[in-house]
Image (tube, grey):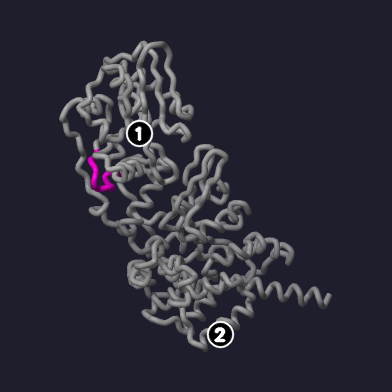
Amino acid sequence: MLTKITGSHLHGVEAFPISVEVYVGNGLGYSITGQPDDIVRESLTRVEIAIKSMGFHMPRQKLSINLSPAYIRKTGAGYDVPIAVGILKASGQLDDLGKLNDYLLAGELGLDGSIYPIPGTLCMAELAVKDRLRGIVIPEGNAQEACLMAGIEIYGVNHLKQVLQFIRSDVDIAINLPSLLAWQPSEPADIPDFREVRGQYRVKRGLEVAAAGGHNSLIIGPPGVGKTMLASRLPSILPPMTSQEMLETTKIYSISGQNLSGAGPVTERPFRNPHHTASAISLIGGGSVPHPGEISLAHNGVLFLDEFYEFSRMAIETLRQPMEEGKVRIARAKMSLEYPADFMLVVAMNPCFCGYFGHPTRKCSCSRRALEYYRRKIAGPLLDRIDLHIEAEPVPLSELAEEQEESECSAVIRQRVIQAREVQDRRYYKVKGVSCNARMPDKEISNYCRLDPIARRFLFKQMEKLQLSVRAYSRILKLGRTIADLAGSKEVELEHVAEAVSFRGLDRAVQLENKRYHRDKDSG
């Protein structure tokens, strides 16, 4: 007897239907075809013991299981439940009331018939909606996540006997949980507040501009000035997530297996802070079984790279394309897939090896050659993609002691950021995939970043002085647009451009070093 059950295969952040075909007939032996990996092959052992533990029997005939289409490599333990149900139905031990044609089944089996959570059930629920299925039967631990997708029935089960009871009867075990529309973005919780930071007004202003426009930023300064402390407070001023952003981010965490605890959707913007020993693969994703990397886990949030210079050159260079395109493509010999990676990059680093280049009181011990080597670690094309170079300077102890006023709290700064983002939402509501100034298409710059003659001459003069690239030019204009939005100005004026140029401090420092080097070389 032949039976077919609908399963699912994950490819990137998308799920595709898999037909689990089970045949029981004359002959001997068990086989699984359709490019199964080792985990799928092992499912027969799990399924056999689980079936016997429930009082059923494995057929003593030829058992052939085909996972179609055969050209896709099947991975993971999510095929256990459809394989078990298919075996029982094909061997005549399970009567179907016609439900199997309308439902997608997925789940990992334990030896006693228990069903354990699996990655990617939100993507499977989305597939069920697209294919107009009636619903899905998934592990109970995944039910809250899958209920984000409205329009289908969600059946959460924790044992195989519940699946069988549902199939052969009219028992309704659907879980009524809020859909995505009912979930609200949560306020930043347990995040340090900017109120606790004394001084460093320049860095606070830079991070406010970065949050308002979604801009990449670099914080550079000597050790102990609070670079990490300030960056860790950035999530407290980010705008709330939209419903679409919550859905996109939750899908990534679902397929990565980081959302198996039944916690529901991701309602706070991610803040990822990988260690500086992280490899290029861990940042961009991939591996023998491809999985999302840190840049995808930071989608719609922040990727913070502390001690930026300590990251490997290869890891740093892999960031360039995703920063530009908002996605990462992973190509392997047998597959090619794509993950979203629309993130804000925030990096923190010392100005040199010893950390005291440009320090007002301490002398730098690095040689010129060492300083040049240190600066070359960040390639020009990557530096062009970082909109703000924020210089963090030591705060004098006398200033800390005399300061009586409380610093501005994160809630006040966040309100300004939200207002600026609302302006941008209205501006780009017709432009697909654009939600902030940092993602403004270059073709729209002439429409939204027009400069008067005085501001244009000033910018051209600064471009020539710092020898900036065309990419840096467009980045400065977008940054000026954000500063104007924060000020409530419809036009980008001279003061906004001047402030945007002032945030290119690393370009200015490198240019001064180059001039000093060539002057010394000519005189020598």
* Residue 25 spot, x, y in % from top left: 36, 14
* Residue 336 spot, x, y in % from top left: 51, 44
The C terminus is located in which quarter? Answer: bottom right
Residue 248, can we see it? yes
Q: Which mark is residue 7?
A: 1
Q: Amino acid at mark 2?
A: Phe
The N terminus is located in which quarter? Answer: top left
Q: Which residues are magenta?
A: 145-154
Which element is circle 1 on? strand
Q: Residue at x 44, y 65 (%)?
A: 214
Q: Give the side of residue 120 with respect to residue 478, left or right.
A: left
Of residues 264 and 356, the one drawn nearer to the viewer in this rendering: 264
What residue would you read off at disc 2?
458
2 vs 1, front mark: 1
Q: Residue at x 54, y 77 (%)?
A: 501
Asked if residue 359 is among those painted magenta in the image, a careful observer would answer no
Q: Quadrant of residue 122?
A: top left
Q: Residue at x 73, y 75 (%)?
A: 516
Q: Give the side of residue 172 with respect to residue 14, left or right.
A: left
Which element is circle 2 on? helix
**Other residues around mark 2 within 10 Å, as few (<14) / some (14–19) / many (≥20):** some
Of residues 16 and 466, the one drawn nearer to the viewer in this rendering: 16
* Residue 521 spot, x, y in % from top left: 80, 73
* Residue 351 spot, x, y in % from top left: 61, 65
Asked if labels 1 and 2 touch by Cβ distance under 8 angstroms, the answer is no
